[in-house]
Image: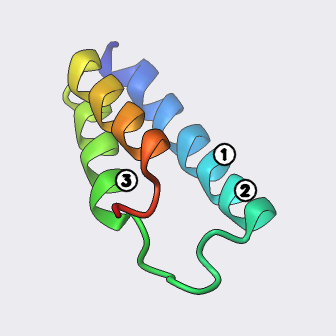
């Protein structure tokens, strides 16, 4: 992903994730839930590392509360 494409993608990804969290109420009890995973996902996307991005996202979806 080029820098320009990534610059357009990251804000869309962020808004989508924020909207999803609002719809599901996942962060009502734990507002810091998955902050580290989200940071790692954005970093991987910004770095153009699809393998790491996929691994982070897969792990987060499989166990969203880290437990």
| Residue 48 as seen in the image, left or right of residue 22 | left
The residue at which mark 1 appears reads as: 16
- In x, y percent, where is residue 9? 51, 30
Q: Which residue appears at 45% of the width and 40% of the height?
A: 62
Q: Is the C-beta separation of discs 2 and 1 under 8 Å?
A: yes
Instruction: Measure the C-alpha gap from mark 2 to mark 1.
Output: 5 Å
The residue at which mark 3 appears reads as: 38
The residue at which mark 2 appears reads as: 19
- In x, y percent, where is residue 42? 33, 43
Q: Which residue appears at 24% of the width and 17% of the height?
A: 51
Q: Is the C-beta separation of discs 2 and 3 under 8 Å?
A: no
Instruction: Measure the C-alpha gap from mark 2 to mark 3.
Output: 14 Å
- In x, y percent, where is residue 3? 31, 23
Mark with earlier residue (2, 3): 2
Element carrying mark 1: helix
| Residue 56 as seen in the image, left or right of residue 5 | left
Q: Is residue 28 above or below residue 56?
A: below
Which quadrant holds the N terminus? top left
């Amino acid at each position: 992903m080029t820098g320009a494409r990534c610059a357009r993608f990251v804000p869309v990804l962020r808004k989508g994730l924020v909207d999803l969290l609002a719809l599901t109420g996942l962060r009502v009890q734990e507002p810091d839930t998955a902050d580290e995973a989200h940071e790692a996902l954005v970093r991987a996307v910004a770095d153009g590392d699809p393998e790491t991005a996929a691994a982070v996202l897969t792990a987060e979806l499989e166990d969203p509360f880290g437990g």
